[in-house]
Amino acid sequence: MTQVSLQQLSRRFGDHLAVRELNLDIESGEMVAFLGPSGCGKTTTLRMITGLLQPSSGDILFDGESVLEVPTERRGAVMVFQKHLLFPTMNVAQNVGFGLKMAHVDKSEIASRVTEILDLVELSGLETRKAHELSGGQQQRVALARALVVRPQVLLLDEPLANLDANLRITMRQLIRTIQSELDITAIFVTHDQEEAVMLADRVALMFDGILQQVGEPDVFYRRPRTKRVAQFFRSDNFLSGIRTGAAVQTSVGEITLDPERVPGADGPVVLTVRPEDVEISTQGSGQGNTVVGQVESPIYMGSYTELLVSVGDETWQVQGPASLAAKEGDEIYLRLPTEHVWIVEDDAVAPEEVPEDSVAV
């Protein structure tokens, strides 16, 4: 197992700063997801870790030792790319064993390790097939096996499931997580898919515009987003501005009560948020606190639930109710915001020096 430490890591391409002063410690045996929209710097970060790109500034440490001067082939970090990049003239066994062959490993040892790793990725019996005879999922397993067979210190995955269909992605997610756990290997992967990050990662590192915005266990991003943009990226666009005084927030649609122990902070202007699935919906007022009145803009039947767009003051909220919910456009509706699910977010994205230590593990 290997601990990876990124210290003030930056990468510039001409005038463009792709990654800015990134600080992150990844523990031995941990799986961390770099998550964010296209162009946010996550793949650039991965390429710096593996040595395919040199940082413009900062340092990368494996187990406390800088690896900046260690060439890619000796760094012990192996990368699985989005495209499988299999050799078309080689069969499965030859593709998987290629790295060992280049390292001049004994033929009998290569055969033994290839057999072992193919069994681990559930490809036993396909040793003699060529790449074009495999499905997309099988090709990706070959690429994964080729990376694992050399027994790397760190496994890096660059959107490895992006080219697979939905069912195959689910299967591969489970397989990757199982293998990573069995081998107890440090793994870092890049994705723009929130669901994939949440399912696979021990911790998620969310990036916007080359800046690390928030780091934590997956549920932190749903229950305690740092900023409006973080909440929106995790599909929560319900915001309400107001003035906080202690546990009470005065808004344009009424008073909302917070749990001050869960939501500490100073009095003054704040922005509240609550996730769509946490809003309690009724067509009649219950008389309970933290209830606001809205007007249905559009109901959308989603099979197992009904999604509503609701006007709340000057905002449009997205909420979820039961599939049987009888609500149509123009209906007045009551939305109760449970105190335990109301959170405060910052208005804007944060700069690197503003990401607090406690955002690393909440």
Image: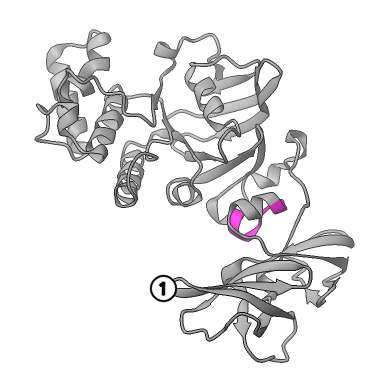
Q: Residue at x 73, y 34 (%)?
A: 352
Question: The residue tagged with tag 1: helix, strand or loop?
Answer: loop
Q: Is residue 173 left or right of residue 224?
A: left
In front: 348, or 49? 348
Q: Residue at x 48, y 51 (%)?
A: 198
Where residue 153 sits, quadrant-wise, is: top left
Q: Quadrant where the N terminus lies?
A: top left
Q: Position of residue 74 (x, y in %)?
A: 41, 12
Q: Position of residue 48 (x, y in %)?
A: 54, 21
In front: 119, or 256? 256
Q: Residue at x 47, y 20 (%)?
A: 50
Would residue 30 be counted in the magenta stretch?
A: no
Q: Position of residue 244 (x, y in %)?
A: 87, 67
Where residue 9 sits, quadrant-wise, is: top right
Where residue 309 sits, quadrant-wise, is: bottom right
Q: Is residue 233 visible?
A: yes
Q: Residues within 10 Å of mark 1 (few under 14, many from 20)?
A: few
Q: Is residue 298 above or below residue 55?
A: below
Would residue 227 be counted in the magenta stretch?
A: yes
Q: Position of residue 339 (x, y in %)?
A: 70, 74
**Residue span colored magenta:** 220-228
Q: Is residue 237 above or below residue 12?
A: below
Q: Is residue 112 left or right of residue 158?
A: left
What's under tag 1, amino acid-wise? Gly
In front: 286, or 72? 286
Q: Is residue 181 left or right of residue 66?
A: left
Q: Which residue was labeled with disc 1?
A: 303
Q: Is residue 226 visible?
A: no
Q: Is residue 65 above or below residue 163?
A: above
